[in-house]
Amino acid sequence: MAIFDKFQHIVEALQELAESGVDTINVVMEQIISPTEAMINGRHTILAGTNNYLGLTFDPDCIDAACKAVHDQGTGTTGSRMANGTYAGHVALENDLADFFGCRGTIVFSTGYVANLGVLAALAGPEDVILLDADCHASIYDGCRLGGADVIRFRHNDVNDLEKRLKRLGERTENALILVEGIYSMLGDRAPLADIAAVKNKYGAYLLVDEAHSVGVLGENGRGLAEEAGVEDSVDFIVGTFSKSLGSIGGYCASNHPELELIRYASRPYIFTASPSPSIIASTRAALAAMRARPELRQRLWDNARRLYQGLQEMGFVLGPEPSPIVAIRLGNKAEALSLWTGLLEHGVYVNMVLPPATPDNFPLLRCSMSAGHSSEQVEHICEAFDSLRKVAQAS
Ligand code: PMP
């Protein structure tokens, strides 16, 4: 059994959860009804924890495109592009993304996680140095490890701390890559990107922004925080995912550097995994077209996000620092989080629960993600569920 001994802490954590009678991990959506509704435990439930920001998973154009691609091209590519060939759809999607971002090139990866692994493993080797925001996503940390660069963490969203650490590097700044996110996935806060870009330019470093949660969400054209902050020219690499506002699965890197193309040849996570299937490519292209053609989706998303943020704030919940489609509720302890999460599910509302050490400041979080697909009645229902549970908790 020795090889399994390392899992003991997991066994204990699962046992503790089982004893509390709450299983937050193995929630099964028995039937998916719409982008914002499913049957869970036999109950009609509003989904408020999906990252389905634009609600495009049931968009008729996306579904038609996916169905047609399955009929015309089959269910899968059955191999990687390097070894087994590229489909025309892969190239078309890369061209669509380059056109959208107004940049020279893009590379499509099989997931957003793989995009970070693939880019960082190829780009930041042992002779390079990475400065990363402490709250960056696990895929960024894992990509850093795979590439083998020196990794320096700076305090979350603290530009002074970043500059102090950059200054210490001396001439190594030309081998330095700064990594931040557009919207951070746990608390929904934005990076201070204009200041970060100014520091990057001052020291001649490179800047990569993971816009997984911000493409389709921020910027006049939905190009993310770099667009909103007016610093697209200072961002060397944008990494993103198809699994959130674009409603499918896959990832990409966009850049104006002609050397981006070389990453394909140096990136094991690109070379040694199967390429996205034709239906995924087709629905993603249709979703990107919908995102560009329908800015009202972004407006609706923000209306819903602000309504929930404001409603919970008025109820006295401790929230992430700014309104965002990710609305994070900080709770005092695990028991409180479990009880609220369970209560919400009983009220027909599904949100995400995040427990330490996965949370930024070691307090448990309930994390809601809002969608353009939520109706105002659904947003009201979510607010009412929180309110009645808060009143019950206060009374007890
Ligand atoms: N980057 C960030 C910031 C993320 O939050 C996520 C997923 N939650 C990813 C990358 C990975 O994306 P994917 O789910 O497409 O693998």
Image (cartoon, rainbow, N blue to C red):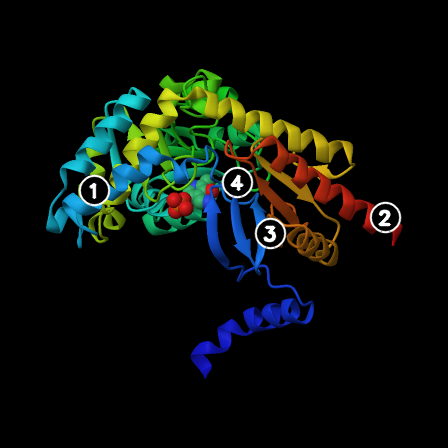
N-terminal-most mark, 1 or 3: 1
User: Can residue 221 be seen from the camera position used here?
Assistant: yes
The residue indicated by pointer 2 is: 394
The residue indicated by pointer 1 is: 69
N-terminal-most mark, 1 or 4: 1
Q: Using the numbered discs, state the Cα–Cα distance from disc 4 to disc 3 in whole angstroms.
A: 11 Å
Considering the numbered disc 2 on the image, is that residue within a helix, a strand or a loop? helix
Instruction: Tell me the kind of residue under disc 4.
Output: Ser
The reply to whether the C-beta atoms of the residues labelled 1 and 2 are less than 8 Å apart is no
Q: Is mark 4 within 8 Å of ligand 1?
A: yes
Q: Is residue 311 left or right of residue 1?
A: right
Instruction: Tell me the kind of residue under disc 3.
Output: Val
Considering the numbered disc 1 on the image, is that residue within a helix, a strand or a loop? helix
Q: Using the numbered discs, state the Cα–Cα distance from disc 1 to disc 4 in whole angstroms.
A: 32 Å
The residue indicated by pointer 4 is: 185
In the depicted structure, whether residue 267 falls above or below residue 180: below
Percent across and percent down for residue 357 are 60, 54
Instruction: Tell me the kind of residue under disc 2.
Output: Gln
N-terminal-most mark, 4 or 3: 4
The residue indicated by pointer 3 is: 354
Residue drawn at the location 30% of the way across and 30% of the way down: 254
Q: Which residue reaches farthest right? A: 395
Q: Is residue 302 left or right of residue 94?
A: right
Neighbour tally class for label 3: few under 14, some 14-19, many 20 plus, Cα within 10 Å:
many
Mark 2 or mark 3, whichever is nearer to me = 2
Percent across and percent down for residue 61 are 31, 33
Mark 1 or mark 4, whichever is nearer to me = 1
In the depicted structure, whether residue 157 falls above or below residue 346: above
